[in-house]
Image (spheres, helix red, strand yellow):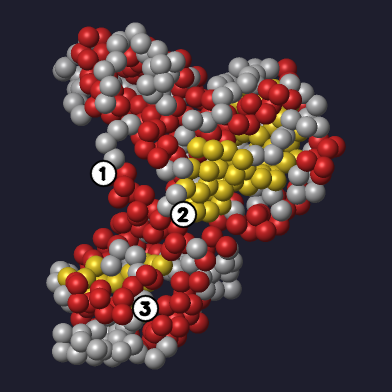
Amino acid sequence: MTAHGENTPLTAETLQKEILGFLTEHIKTDVEPDQDLFASGVVSSMFAMQLVVHLEDAYDIAIVGGDLKLDNFRTVEGMTGLVLRLRDTAEAAGNA
Amino acid sequence: MAEKPTLVKCLVWDLDNTVWDGTLLEDPNVELFPGIRDTIIELDSRGVLHSVSSKNDHDLAWNRLEELGLAEYFVHPQIGWGRKSDAVRLIAERLNFAEKAVAFIDDLPTERAEVNFHAPDIRCYPADEATKLSGLPEFSPEIVTVDARRRREMYQAGFRRDAEKETFNGPDEEFLRTLDLVMEIKRADEEDLSRVEELTLRTSQMNATGVHYSDAALRALLADPDHEVLTVTLTDRFGPHGAVGVLLLERHPDLWHLKLLATSCRVVTFGAGAVLLNWLIDQAARAGVHLAADFKRTDRNRMMDIAYRFAGFADDPCACVAVLGEPAGEGVQRLHLLADRREAPTTMRLGAPELAAAAGEKDAVA
């Protein structure tokens, strides 16, 4: 998986593309950025756990507490927003 | 008092001049040393797994083990011409055991030294001590549960399952549906609690919620009308997974308090935690009560943290938890959920008691 250092700014666009790529690879179905993955039965809550761990590893973030709610993982857009927000927070705190 | 030695969970056997009397390549009809068969069967019944590391022709050696009626006892046999330290470490890795939980027995001091040199935590025994092993404390677990006696069977079913999973091309959930998983949740009796003893003993590894209840504490609550002690077993078409979970629930008039949820790490990939939580939430919704759950984050229970949150448990304050007082123990969080009806699981069949009935009817329902 691509590592994102400080020198390679991560845009929403790249991020979205990468998450879509990860999904396609693992669930072997194409999904839309705004598709509700749980309602459409594409993703099980079990796979969602894999997704959490993957996002943490790939983007060097910690998703804990209230951020772990299922709604944050419902769509690719939602996940993109979450990752960007957590990376911003980490940078602001000087942990980047 | 002397400290109890770490239990051996897998014993790796050399074959020539250790298991059998002679060298297979010189004598195709080598016979077992006296007492070897009994030792293997006895340790197997205690839940100690057996494996093989032998420098031999693989097919010849394995055929001979089959003729001698012993092949079925060995998991992940390593028969070839490589280094024994590599073989023994590979076996430990495949079984997901720490090297200190693995032992090696060989007649040749050089082989034992080689294993010791590269893997100092693996305990090595000379072949002439083979029949004495069952008398040693490191081969004598204090409790031998029903599941321990079936441990080899469960591992072997696990290998067949893994092999099939590797060749399955599709989403995990679809694969799970091919397994014919059946989860049985039941109100525990004494015997059931013995089966989950390993879950409550090895809290650091298995206790998914990080909150510890001893076996004795759980037994004391079996007869308590305000508590539910539930055990969980899982089976699929490859065989049993054994007892894989235990729940402790206390009923209050408007609130159920999930005090303990421990599941075996063997069943995390089956989504067992989520299935259990959804079942419990549905039961609570039918009983018209809120749910509170204790959770203590450890470095090993991340998946259960996620399972709780995904099931809908949150930190939101609710007046209902006031009856519970402060959480017992440092670092224990109290999560809360407004129970709503949930669908039955799509990946397994579920057999479970009706908890929504009033506590007083407990005996009648059980």
| Residue B235 image position (x, y, % from top left) | 50, 49
Q: Work out whether residue B98 can be spotted.
A: yes
Q: Name above or below for residue B210 compared with residue B58.
A: above
* Residue B239 badge: 2
> Upstream in the sequence, badge 2 or badge 3?
3
| Residue A43 image position (x, y, % from top left) | 38, 23
Judging depth in this view, the residue of B191 and B345 nearest the camera is B345
Q: Residue at x 18, y 26 (%)?
A: A2
Label 3 neighbourhood size at 10 Å, few (<14), some (14-19), many (20+)?
Answer: few
Q: CA distance from mark 2 to mark 3?
A: 22 Å
Residue hosting label 3: B69
Count of numbered labels shown in the rendering? 3
User: Same chain for the residues at labels 1 and 2, yes or no?
Assistant: yes
| Residue B262 image position (x, y, % from top left) | 56, 44
Residue hosting label 1: B167
Q: Would you identify the image quadrant in which residue B170 lies? A: top left
Q: Residue at x 53, y 69 (%)?
A: B141
User: Same chain for the residues at labels 1 and 3, yes or no?
Assistant: yes
- Which residue type carries mark 3? Gly
Q: Name above or below for residue B78 compared with residue B158.
A: below
Label 1 neighbourhood size at 10 Å, few (<14), some (14-19), many (20+)?
Answer: few
Q: CA distance from mark 1 to mark 3?
A: 30 Å
Which subunit holds the residue at mark 3? B
**Judging from the image, what secondary structure is the residue with disc 3 in?**
loop
